[in-house]
Image: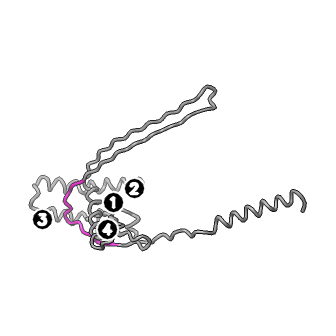
Amino acid sequence: MKGKGWKVLAVVLGIGLLFFIGCGGKEAAPVATGPAWVMKGSGAFDTDKGKVFYGVGVASGIKNRALLISTADNRARAEIAKIMETYVAVLAKDYMASTTAGDMSATSEEQHVEQALKTFSKTTLHGAQIIDHWMDPSDGSYFALCELDLVSFSDALEKHKELDAKVRDYVRRNAEKMHEQLEEEEMKR
């Protein structure tokens, strides 16, 4: 091989060496395989028990085990509360500009986006219960699953005498409607 032949061989060997170096080295971090509800997340679902709201809470970085569990449980309950009733205030600012100089070959693009979001949720979760836990072995994150099924929710409302009859009826009528609206939103995804 003379001249070009050596150069071609050197390029091919160089590319091959880069390929093997790029493929070697660090192994990909293993993905923890947990229960399906961890990946599915919070929302409204139809199950064999009927219509259900699920809230998934997660806590990590807490060494005190009791506090870790309690935090995950409370966050799961909070997810259902956010589904049931949430006040959201949003302030968004969006700025874009494009400037072209003379011959159209030089342009300057810029943009700036800001968003401030504040949410507040307050509700009493009659019939909500933590039904499952899971700890991610890769990082120690602790997950909790809270369930609120519409039958238990309706029964709890019936038994709960503190609520005004009009409020109780309103909540019962709208719980089914809210579940259906959430299902429609989930189907759009």
* Amino acid type shown at disc 4: Leu
Mark 2 secondary-structure assignment: helix
Q: Is residue 103 magenta?
A: no
Q: Which residue is mark 1?
A: 43
Check residue 145 in the rendering and tell me which mark sits there, or answer none. 4
Mark 3 secondary-structure assignment: helix
Q: Which residue is mark 3?
A: 159
Q: Position of residue 19 (x, y in %)?
A: 68, 64
Distance between the alpha carbons at the discs numbered 3 and 2: 33 Å
Q: Position of residue 79 (x, y in %)?
A: 29, 60
* Amino acid type shown at disc 1: Gly
- Name the residue at the right extreme: 2
Q: Earlier in the sequence, mark 2 or mark 1?
A: 1
Q: Position of residue 184 (x, y in %)?
A: 35, 54
Distance between the alpha carbons at the discs numbered 3 and 1: 25 Å
User: Residue, x 33% and y 60% (percent of image)?
Assistant: 43
Mark 3 or 1: the one toward you: 1
> Looking at the figure, which quarter contains the N terminus?
bottom right
Distance between the alpha carbons at the discs numbered 4 and 2: 21 Å
